[in-house]
Image (tube, rainbow, N blue to C red):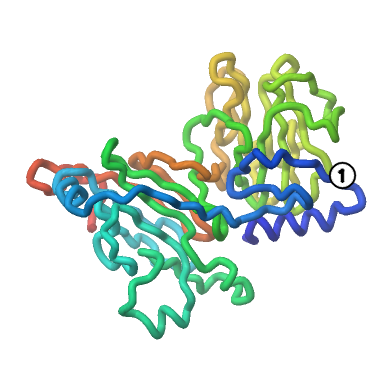
């Protein structure tokens, strides 16, 4: 799958005679990156990662009784399937290339020559994502920290966050999620950005479902087949939106990796617009999950709960929380053969 910036640039070339560029508010931070004001391309230089340091002695004490986290590789073209990465409050337990014991585990890529010639030197990342499946021409542009896992000493829980560099880190949507302004999701080979309010450059929208107001949902699709205009949906006129490749959907995307109805968006009086994977029937029950999942970009820190599934490039991971008893031993059997 191409990186997001390349995909959008390709779509822009396809649309250059029919696509009217929309001026973007520079104060809006799009999930995964920012749309530049001039050309609507994605700017992936969003690597600000300032974190207050935590005493190693404090983290060592917490590591005795705090939960452990296991990150298991469940699907990958380059990493060993079922590989398990153990993390505790100090960070990655075994095999860390950074070996910092600061409560943070960085995942990413380093220069192949650095890895080969300086194996004993601490690296910028703890876990190196094998890049055998990545085109050599773009290797240098994605060397660095792609995402991190951080232990929080106040909540005593682990948090996952994309660092705006590389291919993006996405969590699989299992239960409904409240849509926030500038949310970015990935379905199949397509990406969708959600914003609120009417776009003055496309006042008619698609289907003329437009009224002024902050609750109007603006749906912008970036896919292999170009979408020249965004869609607008106002809750006074429509409260359920289907997205998929079937002609019955409100937002139709020509993408062979999509299900007929891939995801559902509902308007709820208390929560506003929410998104669910698969088709939700009129009675509110899920009819069928999508085949390839609906994925939300992790621009903000995401609390890691047991069973969380996330992906980065062609690597998919599942998270397992391992409870420990007062003696520091595993207190359950959430995962075997660690």
Please identify the residue farthest to the right as the structure is shown: 17
- Dot 1 corresponds to which residue? 20
Q: On the image, which quarter does residue 197 sit in? A: top right
- Residue 183 as seen in the image, left or right of residue 244: left
Which residue does the image show at 57% across and 58% down from the upper left?
A: 167
Furthest residue toward left: 327
Q: What percent of the width, then of the height, locates residue 218?
A: 72, 32
Residue 170 at x, y percent in the picture: 52, 48
Q: Is residue 324 above or below residue 75?
A: above
* Residue at 12% over, 48% down: 329
Q: Residue at x 58, y 14 (%)?
A: 269
The vertical placement of 186 against 203, above or below, is below
Q: Nearer the viewer, residue 174 or 150?
A: 150
Q: Position of residue 6 (x, y in %)?
A: 69, 60
149 or 274, nearer to the observer: 149
Count residues near mark 1 (Cα–Cα under 10 Å), then give few for <14, some for 14-19, many for 20+: few
Lateral position of residue 240 relative to residue 294, left or right: right
């Amino acid at each position: 799958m191409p990186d997001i910036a390349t995909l959008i640039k390709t779509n822009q070339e396809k649309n250059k005679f029919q696509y009217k560029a929309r001026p973007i508010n520079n104060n809006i931070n799009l999930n995964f990156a920012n749309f530049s004001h001039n050309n609507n391309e994605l700017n992936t230089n969003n690597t600000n990662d300032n974190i207050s340091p935590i005493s190693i002695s404090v983290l060592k004490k917490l590591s005795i009784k705090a939960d452990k986290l296991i990150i298991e590789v469940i699907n990958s073209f380059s990493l060993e399937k079922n590989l398990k990465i153990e993390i505790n409050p100090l960070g990655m337990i075994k095999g860390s290339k950074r070996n910092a014991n600061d409560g943070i585990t960085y995942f990413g890529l380093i220069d192949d020559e650095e890895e080969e010639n300086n194996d004993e030197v601490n690296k910028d990342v703890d876990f190196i994502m094998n890049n055998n499946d990545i085109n050599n021409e773009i290797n240098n542009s994605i060397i660095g920290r792609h995402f991190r896992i951080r232990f929080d000493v106040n909540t005593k829980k682990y948090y996952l966050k994309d660092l705006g560099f590389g291919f993006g880190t996405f969590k699989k949507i299992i239960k409904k999620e409240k849509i926030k302004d500038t949310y970015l999701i990935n379905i199949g080979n397509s990406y969708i950005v959600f914003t609120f309010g009417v776009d003055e450059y496309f006042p008619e929208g698609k289907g003329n479902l437009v009224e002024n107001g902050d609750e109007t949902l603006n749906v912008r699709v970036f896919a292999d087949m170009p979408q020249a205009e965004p869609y607008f949906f106002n809750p006074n006129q429509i409260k359920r939106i289907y997205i998929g490749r079937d002609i019955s959907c409100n937002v139709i995307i020509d993408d062979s990796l999509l299900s007929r109805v891939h995801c559902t968006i509902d308007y709820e009086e208390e929560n506003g617009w929410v998104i669910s994977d698969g088709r939700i029937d009129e009675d509110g029950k899920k009819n069928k999950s999508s085949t390839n999942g609906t994925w939300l970009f992790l621009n903000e820190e995401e609390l890691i709960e047991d069973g969380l599934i996330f992906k980065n490039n062609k690597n998919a991971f599942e998270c397992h929380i391992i409870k420990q008893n007062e003696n520091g031993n595993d207190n359950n059997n959430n995962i075997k053969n660690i």
